[in-house]
Amino acid sequence: MVLRVSKVCCGLHHVVLLVSEEESSSSSSSASSSPSSASSLKPTSSSVACLGWNEHGQCDVPRELRVRCGSGGSAANTSIAAGDRHSLAIITDGERSTIHVWGQDNFQQCSSVPAPLDTESDDRRRKYVMIDAGQFHSVVLDSEGEVTCWGGNNFGQCDVPETLGPCVAVAAGGDFTVALRRDDGALFAWGANRQGQAPGKVQPPSRVVAVAAGAFFGAALCADCADNRIFTWGDNALHDSLDVGDDDADTGGVVSAIACGTNHAVVALKRGGVVESGRVPETARLPDDVKLKCVSGTYNSSFGVDENGTLHVWRGEDPHISRSSLGAIGINAAV
Protein backbone atom coordinates (compact mmCIF):
# COMPACT_ATOMS: atom_id res chain seq x y z
CA MET A 1 0.00 0.00 0.00
CA VAL A 2 1.29 3.45 -0.95
CA LEU A 3 0.14 6.62 0.84
CA ARG A 4 0.13 9.74 -1.31
CA VAL A 5 -0.89 13.33 -0.60
CA SER A 6 -3.33 14.78 -3.15
CA LYS A 7 -3.94 18.23 -1.68
CA VAL A 8 -2.67 20.41 1.18
CA CYS A 9 -4.26 23.45 2.83
CA CYS A 10 -2.82 25.38 5.77
CA GLY A 11 -4.25 27.26 8.71
CA LEU A 12 -2.35 29.41 11.19
CA HIS A 13 -0.37 26.53 12.71
CA HIS A 14 -2.10 23.40 11.36
CA VAL A 15 -2.36 21.54 8.07
CA VAL A 16 -5.25 19.74 6.37
CA LEU A 17 -4.30 16.99 3.93
CA LEU A 18 -6.23 14.92 1.43
CA VAL A 19 -4.48 11.57 1.41
CA SER A 20 -4.99 8.74 -1.09
CA GLU A 21 -4.17 5.10 -0.44
CA GLU A 22 -3.05 3.22 -3.53
CA GLU A 23 -2.11 -0.38 -4.17
CA SER A 24 -0.11 -2.03 -6.92
CA SER A 25 -2.24 -3.31 -9.80
CA SER A 26 0.13 -6.25 -10.25
CA SER A 27 1.82 -8.63 -7.88
CA SER A 28 4.95 -8.56 -10.04
CA SER A 29 8.09 -7.31 -8.35
CA SER A 30 9.54 -5.91 -11.56
CA ALA A 31 10.55 -2.26 -11.82
CA SER A 32 7.56 -1.47 -14.06
CA SER A 33 5.16 -2.40 -11.27
CA SER A 34 7.03 -0.81 -8.38
CA PRO A 35 5.18 1.58 -6.08
CA SER A 36 7.18 4.47 -7.52
CA SER A 37 5.54 3.96 -10.91
CA ALA A 38 2.32 5.95 -11.07
CA SER A 39 0.94 3.78 -13.90
CA SER A 40 1.16 0.65 -11.73
CA LEU A 41 -0.97 2.07 -8.93
CA LYS A 42 -4.72 2.24 -8.57
CA PRO A 43 -6.57 4.30 -5.92
CA THR A 44 -8.37 2.35 -3.22
CA SER A 45 -9.56 5.11 -0.90
CA SER A 46 -8.91 8.68 0.16
CA SER A 47 -9.24 10.35 3.53
CA VAL A 48 -8.69 13.66 5.28
CA ALA A 49 -5.84 14.00 7.77
CA CYS A 50 -4.77 16.91 9.96
CA LEU A 51 -1.72 17.69 12.03
CA GLY A 52 -0.30 20.60 13.97
CA TRP A 53 -1.76 22.90 16.61
CA ASN A 54 -4.98 21.37 18.00
CA GLU A 55 -6.02 23.60 20.87
CA HIS A 56 -9.48 24.12 19.37
CA GLY A 57 -9.98 20.65 17.86
CA GLN A 58 -9.07 21.79 14.35
CA CYS A 59 -7.08 18.57 13.87
CA ASP A 60 -9.80 16.24 15.21
CA VAL A 61 -11.01 15.01 11.82
CA PRO A 62 -14.57 13.59 11.92
CA ARG A 63 -14.58 9.80 11.70
CA GLU A 64 -16.46 9.67 8.39
CA LEU A 65 -13.70 11.76 6.78
CA ARG A 66 -10.90 9.68 8.27
CA VAL A 67 -12.35 6.47 6.85
CA ARG A 68 -13.05 7.45 3.25
CA CYS A 69 -14.06 10.47 1.17
CA GLY A 70 -15.95 10.64 -2.05
CA SER A 71 -17.56 8.01 -4.23
CA GLY A 72 -15.21 5.06 -4.44
CA GLY A 73 -12.71 6.93 -2.33
CA SER A 74 -11.98 9.39 -5.14
CA ALA A 75 -9.97 12.43 -4.12
CA ALA A 76 -11.47 14.26 -7.10
CA ASN A 77 -14.79 14.47 -5.24
CA THR A 78 -13.25 16.14 -2.20
CA SER A 79 -12.10 19.71 -1.52
CA ILE A 80 -10.37 20.84 1.67
CA ALA A 81 -9.55 24.15 3.35
CA ALA A 82 -8.17 25.52 6.60
CA GLY A 83 -8.95 28.66 8.54
CA ASP A 84 -6.81 30.01 11.36
CA ARG A 85 -8.28 27.56 13.87
CA HIS A 86 -10.89 25.55 11.97
CA SER A 87 -10.81 23.00 9.15
CA LEU A 88 -13.17 22.22 6.28
CA ALA A 89 -13.93 19.61 3.66
CA ILE A 90 -16.48 19.25 0.86
CA ILE A 91 -17.58 15.70 0.18
CA THR A 92 -19.66 14.99 -2.92
CA ASP A 93 -20.68 11.36 -2.74
CA GLY A 94 -23.63 9.90 -4.62
CA GLU A 95 -26.68 12.11 -4.14
CA ARG A 96 -25.30 14.68 -1.70
CA SER A 97 -22.71 17.43 -1.63
CA THR A 98 -21.89 18.19 2.01
CA ILE A 99 -19.67 20.66 3.87
CA HIS A 100 -17.92 19.40 7.01
CA VAL A 101 -16.33 21.87 9.45
CA TRP A 102 -14.54 21.24 12.75
CA GLY A 103 -12.45 23.28 15.20
CA GLN A 104 -13.00 26.67 16.82
CA ASP A 105 -16.65 27.78 16.78
CA ASN A 106 -16.54 31.17 18.51
CA PHE A 107 -18.22 32.84 15.51
CA GLN A 108 -20.34 29.84 14.49
CA GLN A 109 -17.88 28.94 11.77
CA CYS A 110 -18.59 25.28 12.55
CA SER A 111 -22.26 25.42 13.57
CA SER A 112 -23.82 27.65 10.87
CA VAL A 113 -22.63 25.68 7.87
CA PRO A 114 -24.69 25.81 4.63
CA ALA A 115 -27.03 22.86 4.19
CA PRO A 116 -26.08 19.90 1.99
CA LEU A 117 -27.05 20.04 -1.68
CA ASP A 118 -29.09 17.19 -3.12
CA THR A 119 -27.32 16.58 -6.42
CA GLU A 120 -29.99 14.22 -7.76
CA SER A 121 -33.31 15.96 -7.03
CA ASP A 122 -32.09 19.44 -8.01
CA ASP A 123 -32.73 19.94 -11.72
CA ARG A 124 -29.42 21.82 -12.00
CA ARG A 125 -27.57 19.04 -10.14
CA ARG A 126 -25.81 21.65 -8.01
CA LYS A 127 -22.85 20.71 -5.88
CA TYR A 128 -20.20 22.55 -3.86
CA VAL A 129 -16.98 22.92 -5.85
CA MET A 130 -14.60 25.28 -4.01
CA ILE A 131 -14.09 26.26 -0.37
CA ASP A 132 -11.73 28.49 1.61
CA ALA A 133 -11.48 29.97 5.09
CA GLY A 134 -10.07 33.05 6.79
CA GLN A 135 -9.47 33.84 10.43
CA PHE A 136 -13.03 33.27 11.67
CA HIS A 137 -15.12 32.96 8.49
CA SER A 138 -15.49 30.67 5.47
CA VAL A 139 -16.65 30.94 1.86
CA VAL A 140 -17.96 28.28 -0.52
CA LEU A 141 -18.74 28.28 -4.24
CA ASP A 142 -21.28 25.95 -5.84
CA SER A 143 -21.43 24.64 -9.40
CA GLU A 144 -23.95 27.34 -10.39
CA GLY A 145 -21.51 30.06 -9.33
CA GLU A 146 -23.34 31.06 -6.15
CA VAL A 147 -21.10 32.37 -3.34
CA THR A 148 -22.04 31.77 0.31
CA CYS A 149 -20.18 33.02 3.39
CA TRP A 150 -20.64 32.26 7.09
CA GLY A 151 -18.91 32.75 10.45
CA GLY A 152 -17.34 35.96 11.77
CA ASN A 153 -18.75 39.06 10.10
CA ASN A 154 -17.40 41.94 12.17
CA PHE A 155 -15.99 43.62 9.04
CA GLY A 156 -18.71 42.56 6.61
CA GLN A 157 -16.59 39.75 5.19
CA CYS A 158 -19.68 37.53 4.97
CA ASP A 159 -21.90 40.15 3.29
CA VAL A 160 -21.75 38.91 -0.30
CA PRO A 161 -22.42 41.89 -2.63
CA GLU A 162 -25.91 41.76 -4.11
CA THR A 163 -24.58 42.64 -7.56
CA LEU A 164 -21.79 40.02 -7.52
CA GLY A 165 -23.50 37.45 -9.73
CA PRO A 166 -22.21 33.94 -10.55
CA CYS A 167 -18.49 33.39 -9.88
CA VAL A 168 -15.79 30.91 -10.88
CA ALA A 169 -13.34 31.25 -7.96
CA VAL A 170 -13.30 32.38 -4.33
CA ALA A 171 -10.73 32.92 -1.57
CA ALA A 172 -10.83 34.00 2.06
CA GLY A 173 -8.25 36.29 3.67
CA GLY A 174 -7.92 37.09 7.36
CA ASP A 175 -11.10 39.18 7.60
CA PHE A 176 -11.99 39.66 3.94
CA THR A 177 -13.33 37.64 1.01
CA VAL A 178 -12.36 37.51 -2.66
CA ALA A 179 -14.45 36.37 -5.64
CA LEU A 180 -13.89 36.23 -9.40
CA ARG A 181 -17.06 36.90 -11.40
CA ARG A 182 -17.86 34.50 -14.22
CA ASP A 183 -19.52 36.71 -16.83
CA ASP A 184 -16.93 39.48 -17.20
CA GLY A 185 -13.93 38.28 -15.15
CA ALA A 186 -14.27 41.15 -12.67
CA LEU A 187 -12.42 40.67 -9.36
CA PHE A 188 -14.03 41.71 -6.06
CA ALA A 189 -12.84 41.83 -2.44
CA TRP A 190 -14.95 42.85 0.56
CA GLY A 191 -14.55 42.99 4.35
CA ALA A 192 -11.72 44.52 6.43
CA ASN A 193 -9.85 47.09 4.33
CA ARG A 194 -7.31 48.63 6.70
CA GLN A 195 -4.43 47.63 4.39
CA GLY A 196 -6.32 48.13 1.14
CA GLN A 197 -7.03 44.41 0.82
CA ALA A 198 -10.81 44.79 0.31
CA PRO A 199 -11.49 47.84 -1.87
CA GLY A 200 -14.65 46.43 -3.43
CA LYS A 201 -13.72 46.05 -7.08
CA VAL A 202 -10.06 45.16 -7.62
CA GLN A 203 -8.30 46.29 -10.80
CA PRO A 204 -5.93 43.59 -12.11
CA PRO A 205 -3.88 44.33 -15.26
CA SER A 206 -5.41 41.47 -17.30
CA ARG A 207 -7.75 38.50 -17.13
CA VAL A 208 -7.49 36.61 -13.82
CA VAL A 209 -7.41 32.80 -13.77
CA ALA A 210 -6.77 32.05 -10.06
CA VAL A 211 -6.97 33.90 -6.74
CA ALA A 212 -5.57 33.52 -3.21
CA ALA A 213 -5.62 35.57 0.00
CA GLY A 214 -3.47 36.02 3.10
CA ALA A 215 -4.12 37.87 6.33
CA PHE A 216 -3.91 41.39 4.85
CA PHE A 217 -3.32 40.93 1.12
CA GLY A 218 -4.60 39.17 -1.98
CA ALA A 219 -2.90 37.58 -4.98
CA ALA A 220 -4.14 36.77 -8.47
CA LEU A 221 -2.67 34.81 -11.34
CA CYS A 222 -3.31 36.67 -14.57
CA ALA A 223 -3.39 35.10 -18.01
CA ASP A 224 -0.88 37.70 -19.21
CA CYS A 225 1.11 40.07 -16.97
CA ALA A 226 3.59 42.07 -19.04
CA ASP A 227 6.09 42.51 -16.20
CA ASN A 228 6.09 38.80 -15.27
CA ARG A 229 4.75 39.53 -11.80
CA ILE A 230 1.86 37.94 -9.96
CA PHE A 231 -0.73 40.66 -9.38
CA THR A 232 -1.10 41.49 -5.68
CA TRP A 233 -2.90 44.08 -3.58
CA GLY A 234 -3.18 45.05 0.09
CA ASP A 235 -0.25 45.09 2.53
CA ASN A 236 2.73 45.97 0.30
CA ALA A 237 5.32 44.57 2.71
CA LEU A 238 3.94 41.07 2.15
CA HIS A 239 3.99 40.87 -1.62
CA ASP A 240 6.68 43.16 -2.93
CA SER A 241 8.58 40.87 -5.32
CA LEU A 242 6.55 38.08 -6.94
CA ASP A 243 8.44 38.04 -10.25
CA VAL A 244 8.21 34.66 -12.00
CA GLY A 245 11.25 35.56 -14.11
CA ASP A 246 10.37 34.34 -17.60
CA ASP A 247 10.39 37.03 -20.28
CA ASP A 248 9.50 34.60 -23.06
CA ALA A 249 6.18 33.33 -21.72
CA ASP A 250 2.90 34.66 -20.41
CA THR A 251 2.62 34.54 -16.63
CA GLY A 252 -0.30 32.12 -16.82
CA GLY A 253 1.86 29.71 -18.82
CA VAL A 254 4.74 29.40 -16.34
CA VAL A 255 2.87 29.17 -13.03
CA SER A 256 1.30 25.93 -11.78
CA ALA A 257 -0.22 27.16 -8.48
CA ILE A 258 -0.44 30.18 -6.18
CA ALA A 259 -1.29 30.42 -2.48
CA CYS A 260 -0.95 32.71 0.50
CA GLY A 261 0.12 31.92 4.03
CA THR A 262 -0.68 34.29 6.85
CA ASN A 263 2.17 36.66 6.07
CA HIS A 264 3.66 35.43 2.80
CA ALA A 265 2.80 34.38 -0.73
CA VAL A 266 4.09 31.32 -2.58
CA VAL A 267 4.04 30.71 -6.34
CA ALA A 268 4.89 27.29 -7.79
CA LEU A 269 6.56 27.36 -11.21
CA LYS A 270 5.95 24.77 -13.91
CA ARG A 271 9.69 24.56 -14.63
CA GLY A 272 10.31 23.70 -10.97
CA GLY A 273 10.90 25.62 -7.76
CA VAL A 274 8.92 28.48 -6.25
CA VAL A 275 8.92 32.26 -5.94
CA GLU A 276 7.97 33.69 -2.54
CA SER A 277 7.73 36.98 -0.68
CA GLY A 278 6.64 38.19 2.75
CA ARG A 279 7.63 38.33 6.39
CA VAL A 280 8.72 34.72 6.86
CA PRO A 281 12.38 33.85 7.60
CA GLU A 282 13.91 31.45 5.11
CA THR A 283 15.64 28.73 7.12
CA ALA A 284 15.11 26.06 4.44
CA ARG A 285 14.70 26.27 0.65
CA LEU A 286 12.77 24.15 -1.79
CA PRO A 287 15.13 22.69 -4.45
CA ASP A 288 14.68 24.38 -7.83
CA ASP A 289 14.06 21.08 -9.61
CA VAL A 290 10.99 20.14 -7.54
CA LYS A 291 7.78 20.59 -9.52
CA LEU A 292 4.70 21.20 -7.37
CA LYS A 293 1.05 20.89 -8.35
CA CYS A 294 -0.36 22.35 -5.12
CA VAL A 295 0.98 24.86 -2.55
CA SER A 296 -0.13 26.45 0.72
CA GLY A 297 1.32 28.21 3.75
CA THR A 298 1.00 28.44 7.54
CA TYR A 299 2.11 31.39 9.67
CA ASN A 300 5.79 30.70 9.00
CA SER A 301 6.16 27.67 6.70
CA SER A 302 5.42 26.71 3.09
CA PHE A 303 3.93 23.41 1.96
CA GLY A 304 3.59 21.81 -1.46
CA VAL A 305 2.64 18.53 -3.13
CA ASP A 306 4.52 17.16 -6.13
CA GLU A 307 3.23 14.90 -8.90
CA ASN A 308 4.28 11.78 -6.99
CA GLY A 309 2.19 12.67 -3.94
CA THR A 310 5.16 13.66 -1.76
CA LEU A 311 4.58 16.52 0.69
CA HIS A 312 7.35 19.14 0.77
CA VAL A 313 7.85 21.55 3.69
CA TRP A 314 10.26 24.49 3.62
CA ARG A 315 10.77 28.17 4.54
CA GLY A 316 10.45 28.79 8.30
CA GLU A 317 10.12 26.30 11.13
CA ASP A 318 6.73 25.69 12.72
CA PRO A 319 7.01 24.28 16.27
CA HIS A 320 3.63 22.55 15.86
CA ILE A 321 4.55 20.62 12.68
CA SER A 322 7.58 18.36 12.43
CA ARG A 323 8.81 15.58 10.17
CA SER A 324 8.18 13.08 12.94
CA SER A 325 4.54 14.15 13.18
CA LEU A 326 4.15 13.67 9.43
CA GLY A 327 5.75 10.25 9.63
CA ALA A 328 3.47 9.27 12.48
CA ILE A 329 0.48 9.32 10.13
CA GLY A 330 2.40 7.65 7.31
CA ILE A 331 2.98 10.72 5.12
CA ASN A 332 6.00 10.68 2.81
CA ALA A 333 7.49 14.13 3.37
CA ALA A 334 10.57 16.08 2.37
CA VAL A 335 11.21 18.57 5.18
Image (cartoon, rainbow, N blue to C red):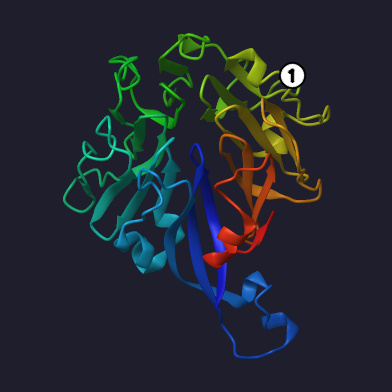
Q: Position of residue 79 (x, y in %)?
A: 42, 48
Amino acid type of the residue tagged 1 in the rendering: Ala
Q: Is residue 131 left or right of residue 3?
A: left
Examine the rendered structure and indicate whether residue 185 appears above or below residue 103: above
Q: Position of residue 45 (x, y in %)?
A: 43, 69
Q: Position of residue 303 (x, y in %)?
A: 62, 46
Q: Nearer the viewer, residue 271 or 65?
A: 65
Q: Is residue 309 left or right of residue 150?
A: right
Corner quadrant of residue 103: top left
Q: Residue at x 65, y 34 (%)?
A: 266
Q: Is residue 209 left or right of residue 287?
A: left
Q: Residue at x 28, y 50 (%)?
A: 97
Q: Is residue 68 visible?
A: no
Crowdedness near tag 1: few (<14), some (14–19) or many (≥20) residues, C-alpha within 10 Å? few
Quarter of the figure that contains the N terminus: bottom right
Q: Which residue is mark 1?
A: 226
Residue sitting farthest toward the bottom: 28
